[in-house]
Image: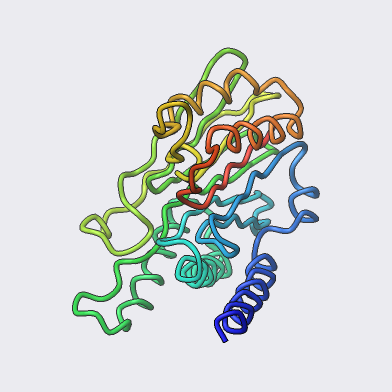
Amino acid sequence: MIEEKHKEITDSINYAERIQRSLLATKELLDENLKEYFILFKPKDVVSGDFYRAAKLSNGNFALLTADSTGHGVPGAIMSILNISCLKESVKEGILQPAEILNRTRKLIIDTLALDGSVEGGKDGMDASLTIYDFKNKKLIVSSANNPVWIIRGNETIEIKADKMPVGKHDKQDISFTQHEFDLQENDVVYTLTDGFPDQFGGDKGKKFMSKRLREILASMAHLPMYEQKDQLEKLFIDWKGNNEQVDDVCLIGVRV
């Protein structure tokens, strides 16, 4: 009976993963709009709270979002579907600026979860970095909730710091997200990520990988072709994790301009 129940649950989760994967940015859309990129996406369980979305905006700019929903596994995946739904609605309304998109998405998430039955109304949501590429004018426009954006230019590393608040209910929920505009140069590499890779325990001493180490490694390999970077990062993560359990979903995206 236990084996039968386990198979039913596993089959259900595997089917749910197919549904969730259909909501991620498609390879066709990414290939049409980006010159060279990689996506390292490793859910902790079969389904994921991390996700990535992309859209061509009405002004011709290209939006790419890397997000980490509250939770992982089944609760995280359900939360990611709500987050995607609210994000799609914001873009559908014709909003073009990343700060405004995150502001509107936050309100939609809060309004939806206000009916979850808890005393305060749901505090779930997501951490996210929303990058909008204006390739015509060689500009990057960024708003970010808790997750940084790193740009590697030759030997220089530029960090676009995130606002210390989520896209969701928070004591700063009435404050607008900050918007950053950055002039791009050819061969700049833009990295967006969730906290799964830096927070992974491993190595000889069983410690966290840490953001500083990851940023330095990305800076050292940014000159490599994107597919090579992905292969090296995947191997690095597996070797670091060793026999430890994966602690969270992992999503790391690199885009060469």
Residue 67 rendering spot, x and y as whole percentages: 50, 53
Camera sees residue 243? yes
Q: Quadrant of residue 29?
A: bottom right
Q: Quadrant of residue 148?
A: top left
Q: Quadrant of residue 115?
A: bottom left
Q: Which one is in front, 249 or 223?
A: 249
Seen from this angle, which residue lies furthest bottom?
1
Q: Which quarter of the image is occupied by the C terminus?
A: top right
Camera sees residue 257? no
Q: Residue at x 47, y 61 (%)?
A: 72
Question: Taking 201 as reference, is 76 above or below it?
Answer: below
Q: Residue at x 40, y 61 (%)?
A: 70
In the visual, does 170 lie left or right of 140? left
Q: Residue at x 76, y 36 (%)?
A: 36
Residue 84 rendering spot, x and y as whole percentages: 54, 67
Q: Which one is in front, 123 or 160?
A: 123
Q: How is the image coloured?
A: rainbow
Residue 86 rendering spot, x and y as whole percentages: 49, 70
Q: Which quarter of the image is occupied by the N terminus?
A: bottom right
